[in-house]
Amino acid sequence: MAARVVFVRLGQIAVTFVVFALFNALGETFVIGNGVSILYPAAAVSVLAFMMFGPWAAIGIILGTLVTPWHTNADFEGLVLSGLIGSLQGFIPWLVFRLRRDLSRDLRDMKSLVAFLFFGTLLNSIVCAFAGNLLVVTHAPGVLLVWRDVFIWFISDFAAVLLIATPILAFGGTLLNRTTPGRPRTIANALEIVSVVLLLGFAASFVIRTVLLLDPLLEPVARRKILIVTSLVDGVVFLILVFAAVMLLYTISR
């Protein structure tokens, strides 16, 4: 029995490591400015891994960070620190849902949805944005924080978790026929989740365009990356809208 538990934990760490490393490397493609990425899907991986596997996910996240450094001269301590901050992204909502047993991890009631949106998308992204900019991002001498970099870190994490982790947590179990016994998902709950994700997704895209694209000092390469990211965000929101429409039609037709 103990050997099986060890095997399962190692598998969870391995899955987290591989997926996080892939998405962390993808995030490097969209770095703008001072080493901060405008698109960081690895944040969603961190949240999903913690919600599914618990604190063991932190090992995979740290190892994934170590093998996919964004700079050739990155030091070991800095990479470990980055991995810890990446783990914090998922640890915060996991801890809240762990302590509050009345909350459902598949977000099948409004209380659970609101708790996840606050602790799993907003608060954790704010904490990581400040921690990353204080401890990881290099600033000019005498400069403690650059608010533009804090905003970019925050919005990239927030958008990724909102548009990737939230739908997977909410509907992944349903699609795999793993529903909570005695608590079937209602169409009203599904539409609540979709509506919130759509509204916040479009809001995130609008804020990125408004705050960043109006910067007169923005370089052309950074501008192209921002346009690509906002197009991706809009595309994901549209796909979620299509999914909601199909799900609604299927439910009505049954």
Image (spheres, rainbow, N blue to C red):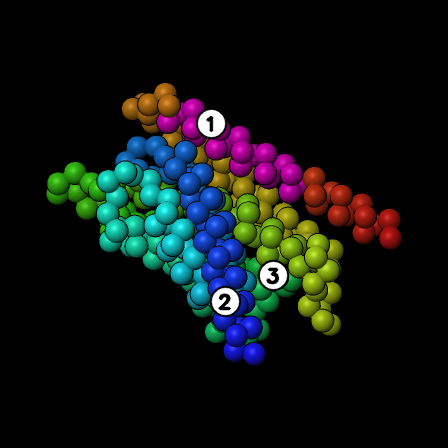
Q: Secondary structure at mark 2?
A: helix
Q: Residue furthest front?
A: 3
Q: What amino acid is labelled 1 in the image?
A: Leu
Of badges 2 and 3, nearer the viewer stands 2
Taking depth in this image into account, of 223 and 6 the one nearest to the observer is 6
Residue 124 position, x and y percent, is: 41, 56
Q: Residue at x 28, y 38 (%)?
A: 72
The residue singled out by tag 1 in the image is 227
Taking depth in this image into account, of 156 and 196 the one nearest to the observer is 156
Q: Which mark is residue 9?
A: 2
Q: Cα distance, mark 2 to mark 3?
A: 25 Å
Visible in this render: residue 163?
A: yes
The residue singled out by tag 3 in the image is 107
Q: Residue at x 24, y 40 (%)?
A: 73
Name the dominant secondary structure of the magenta segment.
Answer: helix
Q: Residue at x 67, y 41 (%)?
A: 241
Visible in this render: residue 120?
A: no
Q: Cα distance, mark 3 to mark 1?
A: 31 Å
Magenta residues?
222-241
Pointer 3: residues within 10 angstroms few (<14), some, or many (20+)?
Answer: many
